[in-house]
Amino acid sequence: MNLPYDIFKAWVDTTVFVAVKRVKKALWPRIDQRSVTIITFPKRHRIKKTKEFAEHASKAEFSSWFADGGDEYLSYADAASTAVMRKIVAAGKPLGEMADVQRGVTPFNLTEKPTHSTSRPAFRGKVRRYVFERGDQCFIRFDRSLAEPKPERYFLGLRLLLRELISRQFQLQAVKVTADFVTNKSMQSLLPSSNGPDLNYFLGVINSRLMSWYFLRRSNVAQRDDFPKIVLKETRSLPIRPIDRSDHADKSRHDRMVKLVEEMLEMHKKLGVAKTPQEKTSLERQIAATDTQIDGLVYDLYGLTEDEIKIVEGPP
């Protein structure tokens, strides 16, 4: 049972498990089917009547949670959601096998000016979906004095930045950058392989509604009220649909994604400097329409049916 935020006076997010002792022992992983009931309330809901528990209940197949060899209790994934998640995993490949992903450095002690021969530009701006704000100029000593140094390649040239924190809209937040600067451990850098998909392709899939939905169904940490996040291990395991460039339909979908994402990046840049309400409204509508097109393309890439799309786009 996944309770709403702030159900208790203590600021904790609460999931309650109710279990009964088995009459017959079972080896791990469980292979015999066992039905469980999941009760999930909306995050800001206020429970007023006991009948609401039944109204927010759904069924799940316990053993299906462990079908991929993991041992996580997917308390947000009912039977229908679990089936869609398995389809996504089957169509995809772990991101860590398709790209080089690493988080930033720590500690992140910044200065206004270079203080050492190893000082490098550092980042203290903002990252949102398709939006990058550099922030004020600052520097960091980039050498072995760092507790967790990282190879410099993660902070140079063309790459994606994925913010560790999940947005208040429960979405993954990534953007494409080209400038050289060092990031802290709250940012993850993604470098594409030389023969893999275009960086825009990765960006579109990661920022899509489907990928956020998939991740949120797998992670209780991403669902919490304070500091919901995605850690490096989870990023590397995201199932990204590979592209077969020898397949005309596959290449066409890849190229369309690259084009739509480039348009999205440009529209967000224009929105950031728009001066009139009319211009802002027009750009916001174009962005929403392009977002919908990208989501539709991602559904197509993973082979989702209309019924499966309804599950993804249903209540959180």
Image (tube, helix red, strand yellow):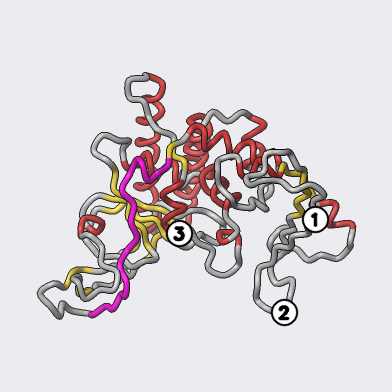
Choose mark 1 or mark 3, whichever is in front.
1
Residue 119: image x %, image y %? 16, 73
- CA separation, marks 1 and 3? 34 Å
271 lies above or below 59: below
Of the pair 213 and 71, the residue shown nearer to us: 71
The quadrant in which the N terminus is found is bottom right
- Element type at mark 1: loop
Q: Which residue is painted at 71% across and 46% down in the image?
A: 26
Residue located at (74% from left, 48% from top): 25
Three-letter code, disc 1: Lys
Specify the amino acid type for callout 2. Answer: Lys
Contact, CB < 8 Å: mark 2 with mark 3?
Answer: no
The percent position of residue 261, horizontal first and vertical second, equals 38, 41
Q: Position of residue 178 (x, y in %)?
A: 24, 53
Q: Which residue is mark 3?
A: 231
Location of mark 2 (residue): 9
- Identify the amino acid type marked 3: Val
Is residue 273 in view from this perspective?
A: no
Residue 53 horizontal side relative to residue 134, left or right: right
The magenta region covers: 94-111
Is residue 103 covered in magenta? yes
Alpha carbon separation for disc pair 2 and 3? 28 Å
